[in-house]
Image: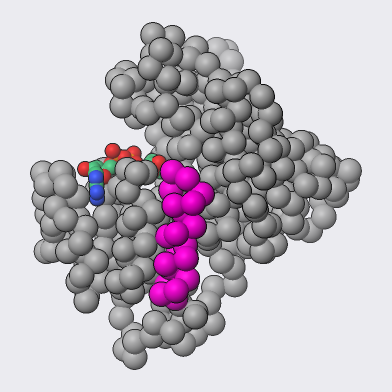
Amino acid sequence: MSYFQHQVAEARPVRIGLIGAGWIGKFHAESVALRIPNARLEAIADPALPAVESLAERLSVAKISTDPADVLADPDVDAVLIAAPVRFHSGLIAAAARAGKHVFCEKPGGRTVEELDEALNAADAAGVLVQFGFNRRYAPDFAAARRLIDEGVVGTPQLLRSLTRDPGSDAGIANPERIPPGTIFLETLIHDFDTLNWLNPGAVPVRVHAVADALVAPEAKPGGLLDTAVVTVTYSNGAIAVAEANFNALYGYDVRGEVFGSAGMVAAGGPQASSATSYTAAGIRSATVRLNVDLFHAAYTAEVAHFVDTIKAGRDGLQAPGSRGPGGTDARNALAVALAAVRSAESGMSVEIASIAELRAAEPEFHLAGGKA
Ligand SMILES: NC(=O)c1ccc[n+]([C@@H]2O[C@H](COP(=O)([O-])OP(=O)(O)OC[C@H]3O[C@@H](n4cnc5c(N)ncnc54)[C@H](O)[C@@H]3O)[C@@H](O)[C@H]2O)c1
C-alpha cells in the first residue's frame, strides 16, 4: 500500500499534531506554525500541561491535551510530529499509523531494532509516510557534499569521518542524571552514524568498535553516563569510518563530516556561525553558536517542510518531491550501529552488526532541490 492512497480532494494545508512539546518539539512547532506555508499546527499533546499551554497560546493553537491519544483520534489531524522521549517513539509511530496519520518522528525510532520494526510494519500496513529527524541531511553544506559524492568527486570511499561536539548547555552536563546511559550513542552519535551511512551510498555498516568515557563529568561515570566517545565503523564496501562526540565543546556547537576516497575528498560543516571572519591585531575570529537549533536552524525547518511537501504532493495527486526523506531503512541502519556501539563500549570488543540486525542499503538517492554550499 502506498501513502498516496491517503488522498483528500481539496487543497489545504497539511494539518499537524505535535506529540511532545519539549526542547525540539517547540522548535518544530514554530517551524510548522510560522515558517512552513503549506502546514498548520492543528493540535499539541504533552503530559506537561504548562509547556503545552504557553506554546499553544503563543502559536494560536486551540486544541491542546495531556494525552497523545486525543491528537491521534482527531479527524482534523493529517500527520503527527513525534518529539517525545525515546521510550515512547515506536509505540507512538505504530499508534499513529493505526490512526491513519503520517509520521515525522525524532531520532531514534526506537530503543531496539525489534520495536522499531514493529512500528515500521504498522506504518507499512497502514500506508502512511514515515520520516525520521536526521536533520543533517537537510543542512545545505552536507546536502552539497552528498551531491558531490554522487557525482563521483570522491571516487571509491575509503575513509569517512563525522563528529559532534556539543557545548553541553542543553545536554544535561550541568544535571547529568538527566542523561540515561547509552545516550551518547543512541541520541547524539546516531546523527553521525546516519550521516556516515548516507555519505557512503550503497554500502551497509558491518562492524563497530566503540571506546567511550566520562571525561567531562567523571563523577557521572558510576551511573553509566558517558560524555566522550570514538566509534569506528567498517562498511560492506571496505570503507572505514570514525565518529566522535563530546558534550563540552567550550568554543561552540561543532558538527563536521568528511569523505576521503580514491579520487579526492569532500568535507562539510564546522563550528562557524557564518563565513564572516574578522582579521585584527588580536588575530582571526569568527563567531560560533551554542545551540543545535541555531547551527541547524535551516535544516530543522527544511526537514519538516520536506515531510509536509511529500504528504501534500501525494494528497493532491502531484508528483512527490524529487527525493525522499530519511525513512525506515535509514532509521534501522543508524539504530543498529548505535546499539552495536553501546554493546562494544560495554564489552571492549568489536561488534558485528549482523548480531544486532540484518541490514539493507537505503535506496541510493537523496537530493535536496535547491541546496547549495
Ligand atoms: N534531531 C535533533 O537534532 C534533536 C535535538 C534534540 C532532541 N531530539 C530528539 O527529540 C526527542 C525529544 O528530545 P527533547 O530534547 O525535546 O526532550 P525534552 O525532554 O525537552 O522534551 C520531551 C517532551 O516530551 C514530553 N513527553 C513525555 N512523555 C510524553 C508522551 N508519552 N507523549 C508526549 N509527550 C511526552 C515531555 O513532557 C517533554 O515536554 C528525543 O528523541 C531526542 O533525541 C532530536
Q: In this view, does 286 lie above or below 35?
A: above
Q: Quadrant of ligand 1?
A: top left
Q: Residue at x 88, y 45 (%)?
A: 263
Q: What stretch is highlighted in magenta?
A: 110-130
Camera-side residue: 226 or 365?
Answer: 226
Q: Does the magenta segment cover residue 278? A: no
- The answer to which of 175 and 145 lies nearer the viewer is 175
Residue 343 lies in quadrant: top right
**Whole-percent x, y for residue 101 in the image:** 33, 70
Most extreme residue toward the top, as rendered? Answer: 219
Place of residue 258 in the rendered image (x, y in percent of width and height, measured from the top left): 70, 38
> Taking 96 as reference, is 199 above or below it?
above
**Residue visible at 29% across and 66% down in the picture:** 16
Classified by dominant secondary structure, the portion drawn in magenta counts as helix
Can residue 258 be seen here? The reply is: no
Locate residue 351, reporting x and y percent: 66, 33
Up/down of 236 relative to 229, above or below: below
In this orientation, which residue lies closer to the viewer: 270 or 277?
A: 270
User: Is residue 114 found left or right of 340 in the rendered image?
Assistant: left
Rendered residue at 43%/68% (across/down): 123
Q: Is residue 208 left or right of residue 57?
A: right
* Image coordinates for residue 227, horizontal then vertical, percent: 47, 21
Outermost residue, bottom direction?
9
Q: How many labels does the image show?
A: 0
Q: In which quarter of the image is residue 11?
A: bottom left
User: Which quarter of the figure has residue 86?
Assistant: top left
Residue 249 in the figure: left or right of residue 88? right
Inspect this view and state whether residue 319 appears. yes
